[in-house]
Image (cartoon, grey):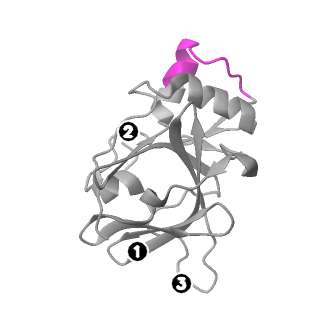
Amino acid sequence: MRGAKLFVIAAAGLLMASCGPALTLNPLFEESELVLDPALLGTWGEGETFMKFECGDRKTYKLTYRDGTKESVFEAKLGQLDGQLFMDIYPVDQEGSEGGNEAYAPLVPMHTIMKVEIEDDQLVLYLLDSDWVQKQLDEGGLQLDAEHVLKTGDNLFITLSTDRLQDLVRNHAYEDEAFPRSDPLPRIE
């Protein structure tokens, strides 16, 4: 276990059991593919650990993740692949804030991809799992080569173009190991 708290699972009150999310160099969606879903707006979580989605610029959301006194801000983009909602988040530099994105942020600015379900005032997020990507690479299950996946320490970075990244996500969207389910986050407001 890497010991890092993954913000979505931390929001549900659990520590990350696997290596963490697979991070991507490129976004999952082009600007023309973005959608807005008003059901996402609001605050989700429990107690002092929550995620707040607000309207952002153009077709984006401002996502504020708070864990106690620590806070991180992201630009979140929502899109659909084969009728399923997916989100791509990217850390936003918080100029003037002491410590910057301190609740959760990749060591380098990269995209984090997750499947999204909103139902009965609960938000469920499924992150693309780096352990699954590594296992697939080791077993030859993914047709990726060294130029498309970089591994540095415990971090795994996918460098596929947006269209190839969409193909990867589309082909494995319903595999539980590829996109493990987090505990549902209740709507706070």
Q: Which residue is mark 1?
A: 70
Residue 28: percent from the left, percent from the top? 65, 43
Q: Residue at x 66, y 17 (%)?
A: 143
Rendered view: 165 above or below 116 = above
Q: Is residue 154 at all visible to an observer of this figure?
A: no
SS for callout 3: loop
Write down the quadrant of residue 147 in the picture.
Answer: top right
Residue 98 numbered mark, or none? 3
Badge 2 element: loop
Q: In the image, 40: left or right of 188?
A: right
Q: Residues within 10 Å of mark 1 (few under 14, many from 20)?
A: some
Q: Which quarter of the picture shows residue 12?
A: bottom left
**Is label 3 in contact with label 2 (beta carbons under 8 Å)?**
no
Mark 1 or mark 3, which is nearer the start of the sequence? 1
Q: Residue at x 58, y 27 (%)?
A: 170
Query: Which label's residue is closer to the chain start, 2 or 1?
Result: 2
Q: Which residue is mark 2?
A: 18
Please state the extent of the stretch shown in magenta in the rendering: 135-146
Q: Residue at x 65, y 33 (%)?
A: 166
In three-dimensional space, the C-alpha distance between marks 3 and 2, rounded to whole angstroms, equals: 30 Å
Name the amino acid, label 1.
Answer: Lys
Mark 1 lies on a secondary structure that is strand
